[in-house]
Image (cartoon, helix red, strand yellow):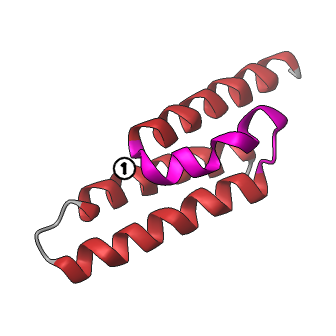
Amino acid sequence: MNDLDILVNMKSEALITRICMSSTDIGESLAAQEEFHALVDAFFARYPRESFLDHAAKSKEDTDYFVALLDEAIQQTKKKMRENV
């Protein structure tokens, strides 16, 4: 799996997990929040880009912010792929 596929999968997981975080079932909501935090940690561990390092804490608090970072990473990866062709 290439970086673009990984990032797109992370974005899909983030969007699905965000929905589960708003569940009225407190157990489901808390489990989804833990999964979301693990996803954020996985992103920053895999892509420790200098410009993103100070954004980890905010990403755990703001799902929209994290999805925006994923979108940015996806766009950067697509650009690099086009340049390398």
Neighbor class of circle 1 (other Cα within 10 Å; few <14, some 14-19, many 20+) is some
Look at the image and tell me in which quarter the C terminus lies.
top right
Look at the image and tell me in which quarter the N terminus lies.
bottom right
Which is nearer the eye, 81 or 58? 58
Going by the image, does 69 lie left or right of 31? Answer: right
Which is nearer the eye, 62 or 32? 62
Q: Is residue 10 above or below residue 67?
A: below
Mark 1 lies on a secondary structure that is: helix
In percent of the image, x 45 and y 73: which residue is there?
34
Query: Which percent across, then down, holds residue 66?
Result: 51, 42
In percent of the image, x 75 and y 43: which residue is there?
53
Mark count: 1
Identify the magenta region.
Answer: 47-63
Q: Quadrant of residue 19?
A: bottom left
Query: Which percent across, then down, holds residue 24?
Result: 10, 69
Q: Is residue 78 above or below residue 28?
A: above
Q: Which residue is mark 1?
A: 15
In percent of the image, x 73 and y 30: which residue is there?
77
Residue situated furthest left in the rendering = 24
In percent of the image, x 57 and y 38: which residue is there?
70
Q: Quadrant of residue 21?
A: bottom left
Say which amino acid is labelled 1: Leu
Magenta-colored stretch includes residue 45: no
Which is nearer the eye, 25 or 8? 25
Going by the image, does 36 lie left or right of 41? Answer: left
